[in-house]
Amino acid sequence: MKLPSQLFVDGAWHAAKSGRTTHLINPATEQPFAEVAAAGAEDVNAAVESAHRAWEGGWRDLAPGKRAEILFAIARLLRDYAEHLAEFEMLQIGKPISDARDEVLLGARVFEYYAGAVGKFCGQTIPVARGGLDYTLRQSMGVVAAIVPWNFPFPIAAWKAAPALAAGNCVVLKPASLSPLTALALGQIAHAAGLPPGVLQVLSGPGAAVGDALVTHPLIRKVSFTGSTEIGRRIMELAARDIKRVSLELGGKSPNIVFADADWQRAAESSPMSVFANTGQDCCARSRMFVERSVYAAFVEKFVAATQKLIVGDPTKAETQLGPMVSASQRASVEEYLADARKQGSTFATGGGRPHSKGFYLEPTVLLDVGKNDRCWREEIFGPVVAITPFDDEAEMLREVNASPYGLSGSIWTNNLSRALRVSRTVQSGVLSVNSHSSVHVEAPFGGFKASGLGRDLGMAAMEGYSEVKNVYVAE
Ligand code: NAD
Ligand code: MN
């Protein structure tokens, strides 16, 4: 499969109507390696209108079995092309190749899950009056805009497109400017697997132009967005004009809470990757650690040792755990946080510098003595930086956990069952794991509380979010 370079619309490749393109830079080498069409508002109009025709013209009314068959075929072809897709992902964002492979297979698995869900997605019959029949229908909405970020480009594109298509919608997918390749490839692969033209349109292009045009287009019925809280807020405001449905998966500042009664050695060994994986560019990154004081010093020592063992480097090598950051500007933004930490007098237990002279690399960095009002404690850094603090009292620690405006993910380490239940009930967060760092399961709902978002991806919850409920009463 060749590197995609154009928009995928109506089952074929097209240049942007303006003729504009953007260059992609490999973050590991700092070299430009591809040129991709940059769509504008005029491309959005054409793509949305034709997606709407594809919806009315057949996709919405296709027999569930047929729709499922096509989604299964997409999953099969994604597996066939997994190596190509993984390489595209690695080239465009510097993701280590083994992570890229896993994520492509996760995306294929998402298509399989929703292929299987098509015929199991049902309404209800409801007893409302004697004799008559009351039933609900789960109906498709029309054209859904899926706007996705650059940190997990392929899996997030899949976990929006697959349930939306399974529920009978057509989709216009907009990848982030830094990471268009795997989304564009998905468009072509889905078409090759039998998805009719127009049902999945893929427009690469700048968020300000393409994103705004999509969100305000009258034929878009729902906007499913993953990205920053700032842009999410803007999308919700724009969507309010037409009461468009929105689902928003936004930023996070997730806690990792370690009690002294836990297997804290295991927690210390596994926790670095819960924040540094994907070079910290992860909405679920456990970037605030709370460790019970009696084990704090020993925990920090083990955590720092495990961090120093992480392999940071060439994403083409199978053993690499952390690649470069996505761009020079993303690294610069993280380095501003580190400068603030220095100014505030935080301790750098390890990291803080650039490990390689070429590529947008940054060392995994462990901060201690970070003040509760410091930027590094309060804000999403979106880079390989963790702040660790000791705590004495459970209730007081939980107040600090919940003082964050975010509530996406988090981990709780304890072997006390009552405590695990109590703390997981209290933490204000959409996703939690006990004695583990998992956040994402295809079968389970994923999303945030508070400023971390609205609505849920994955599981059957996502499919509900891509449908309208209609209630019908029929008198006897
Ligand atoms: P971003 O908000 O800058 O961009 C996300 C997408 O929105 C991109 O496709 C971008 O082009 C587009 N966009 C930009 N301006 C727009 C506008 N005015 N209208 C419509 N679309 C617009 O986010 P990012 O930098 O790509 O990703 C990092 C952020 O994403 C972090 O805050 C991270 O926490 C968040 N994120 C959240 C989740 C989650 O599931 N909660 C998952 C991954 C990333
Ligand atoms: Mn951004």
Image: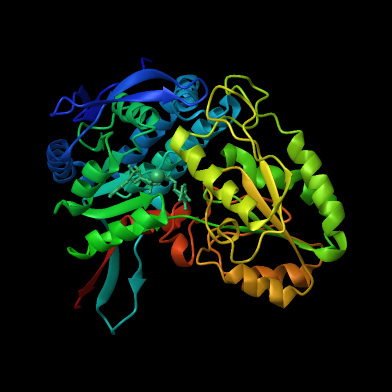
Q: Nearer the viewer, residue 6 or 126?
A: 6
Please identify the quarter of the rendering in which residue 8 is found.
Answer: top left
Residue 307 horizontal side relative to residue 287, left or right: right
Residue under the point 24% across and 30% down: 38
Q: Can see residue 4? A: no
Relative image position of residue 145 (x, y in whole percent): 27, 47
| Residue reaching furthest to the bottom | 130
Quarter of the image where the N terminus is located: top left
Figure check: 463 above or below 207: below
Relative image position of residue 102 (x, y in whole percent): 56, 32
Figure check: 10 above or below 256: above
Q: Can see residue 451? A: yes
Residue under the point 44% across and 37% down: 329
| Residue reaching furthest to the front | 343
Relative image position of residue 47 (x, y in whole percent): 17, 38
Residue 393 horizontal side relative to residue 235, left or right: right
Relative image position of residue 10 (x, y in whole percent): 18, 30
Residue 396 horizontal side relative to residue 154, left or right: right
Please identify the quarter of the rendering in which residue 13 is found.
Answer: top left
Q: Nearer the viewer, residue 28 or 83?
A: 28
Q: Nearer the viewer, residue 104 or 401?
A: 401
Mark count: 0
How is the protein colored in the picture?
Answer: rainbow
Quarter of the image where the C terminus is located: bottom left
Residue under the point 78% across and 44% down: 304
Figure check: 190 above or below 265: above
Residue under the point 21% across and 24% down: 12
